[in-house]
Amino acid sequence: MSAASAHWPAWHEATALQLLAPLLSLPGPLLPALHAVQAHFGFIPPEATALLATTFNLSRAEVHGVITFYDFFRREPPGQRIVRLCQAEACQAMGSEALAAHAKAQLGVDFHQTTADGRVSLEPVYCLGNCACAPAMMIDERLHGRVSAARFDALVLAGESA
């Protein structure tokens, strides 16, 4: 078991079926189903592809195509904290590229990777809707604006909530 996967529940088909049951009557339920599976397990486990295909009468290729098309869906367990750095134009104009380079250097990972200790996953995102306070970053579900290299270090590396 990787350090990252220790923070999330192990795959359990019965649990996944319980997550999918309320979605069966929805039109086009695959995206809500993928979000539900990832919210619970932290990522989309390989076993989920066949279950989703069978449950929603889709081919495995269709399910796999949706998982790999959308950058949001992970196929590996994320770290304990997920740090998303905005890479959209407004944030780029305010220094997000330098911030991303700093984050990668400090964490020792690239985008879509998790630190060796499983603490932090670094993800790019293309607009957090916080353009007036660029560059923006989200840690788990908490939005932060006007993020400098020093503020990144304080928020992510030191684990502060400021």
Image (tube, rainbow, N blue to C red):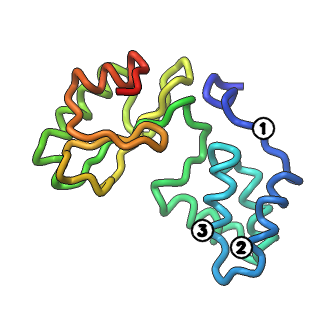
In depth, the one of 2 and 82 nearer the eye is: 82
Q: Earlier in the sequence, mark 2 or mark 3?
A: 3
- Report x, y in % for residue 139: 42, 37
Q: Residue at x 60, y 47 (%)?
A: 75
Q: Residue at x 26, y 48 (%)?
A: 87
Q: Amino acid at mark 3?
A: Leu
Q: Residue at x 72, y 76 (%)?
A: 58
Query: SS for tag 2?
Result: loop
Query: SS for tag 1?
Result: loop
Return the residue at label 3: 31
Instruction: Confirm or deny contact between disc 2 and disc 3 (CB under 8 A).
Output: no
State the separation of the CA atoms marked 2 and 3: 15 Å
In depth, the one of 90 and 144 nearer the eye is: 144
Q: Is residue 1 above or below residue 44?
A: above
Q: Which mark is residue 59?
A: 2
The image quarter containing residue 161 is: top left
Q: Is residue 141 above or below residue 18?
A: above
- Report x, y in % for residue 44: 65, 51
In the image, which is nearer the foreground, mark 2 or mark 1? 1
Q: Which mark is residue 10?
A: 1
* Image side of residue 140 versus residue 144, left or right: right
State the separation of the CA atoms marked 1 and 3: 21 Å
Q: Residue at x 66, y 30 (%)?
A: 7
Q: Amino acid at mark 1?
A: Ala
- Report x, y in % for residue 121: 47, 33
Looking at the rendered image, the quarter that the C terminus falls into is top left
Instruction: Confirm or deny contact between disc 2 and disc 1 (CB under 8 A).
Output: no
* Image side of residue 2 versus residue 54, left or right: left
Q: Earlier in the sequence, mark 1 or mark 3?
A: 1
